[in-house]
Amino acid sequence: MPTRLILATQNEHKVREIRELLADLDVEVTHPGELDDAPELAETGETFAENARQKALACAQATGELCLADDSGLMVDALGGEPGVRSARYAGEGASQEDLIGKLLGELAGVAMPERTARFVCALSLCGPEGGIGGGGGRVEGAITREPRGTGGFGYDPVFYHPPAGKTFAEMTPEAKNAVSHRGRALQRFGADLPAILRGREHRRI
């Protein structure tokens, strides 16, 4: 019987990506939107890792089940690492993708391409009601384009250029993006470790 894993996120784009990336594992992936009593998930940490653990632990303690949280964002060198942990709120609470991209490009107006280096960063945390039991992370280097390109992906994908592919994330197929993205890399490592993590947890409970 598959292990049930609750994704501690309300972001449907992330849910879809994570389900695809964990499809080969013996897990049943669900999320709070599919639960009768969805837990409150806050992000008040100062790092991606702190936010991921905070969300995963809150979800696990509210549901009594295994919960996986991802916290990720964009770090732009010319902006001193911003928007960072505020990536989803960079243009204010409830901002649209267009708002986020518009603010980012406005902040980078006049910055030459060689100085528009950036990276996507992802932190993962797996928690049970008893606390943290696993996690990991991943990152991918790139640059911010001068205008959006492509219609795929979400968030900052239309302006995040991946040099090896010669495309923005939004111009890549989901499969190609997942193979190289920050979240894809983090989940590839996590997926490889998960069976041993689950075996160890069951052994401690016996």
Image: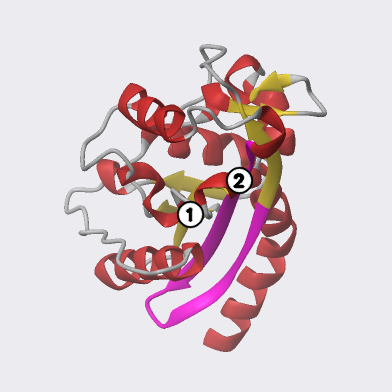
**Relative to 135, residue 106 above or below:** above
Q: What residue did someone put label 2 on?
A: 183
Residue beneath the point at 48% across and 28% down: 109
Pinpoint residue 1: horizontal percent, then vertical percent. Answer: 55, 53
For the C terminus, the image quarter is: bottom right
Contact flag, marks 1 and 2 (Cβ < 8 Å):
yes
Q: Along the line of sight, which residue is nearer the eye, 84 or 176?
A: 84
Amino acid found under the numbered disc labelled 1: Asp
What's the residue at 57%, 20% (across, down)?
170
What is the x, y in percent for residue 200? 65, 79
Count of numbered marks: 2
Above/below status of 23 relative to 159:
below
Q: Which mark is residue 165?
A: none
Residue topped by disc 1: 70
Crowd tier of the residue under label 2, counting other residues whose Cα lies within 10 Å: few below 14, some 14–19, many 20 or above: many
Q: Looking at the picture, which amino acid does disc 2 mark?
A: Arg
Q: Position of residue 55 (x, y in %)?
A: 35, 63
**Badge 1: residue crowd in 10 Å (few <14, some 14–19, many ≥20):** many
Residue at 36%, 43% (x, y): give it. Answer: 88
User: In the picture, residue 46 is in which quadrant?
Assistant: bottom left
Q: What color scheme is it?
A: secondary structure
**Residue at screen point 31% across, 61% down:** 43
Of mark 1 and mark 2, the one earlier in the sequence is 1
Q: Is residue 206 visible?
A: no
**Residue 154 location in percent, x, y?**
46, 27
The Cα–Cα distance between marks 1 and 2, rounded to whole angstroms, is 8 Å
Q: Which residues are magenta?
A: 116-138
Q: Secondary structure at mark 1?
A: strand
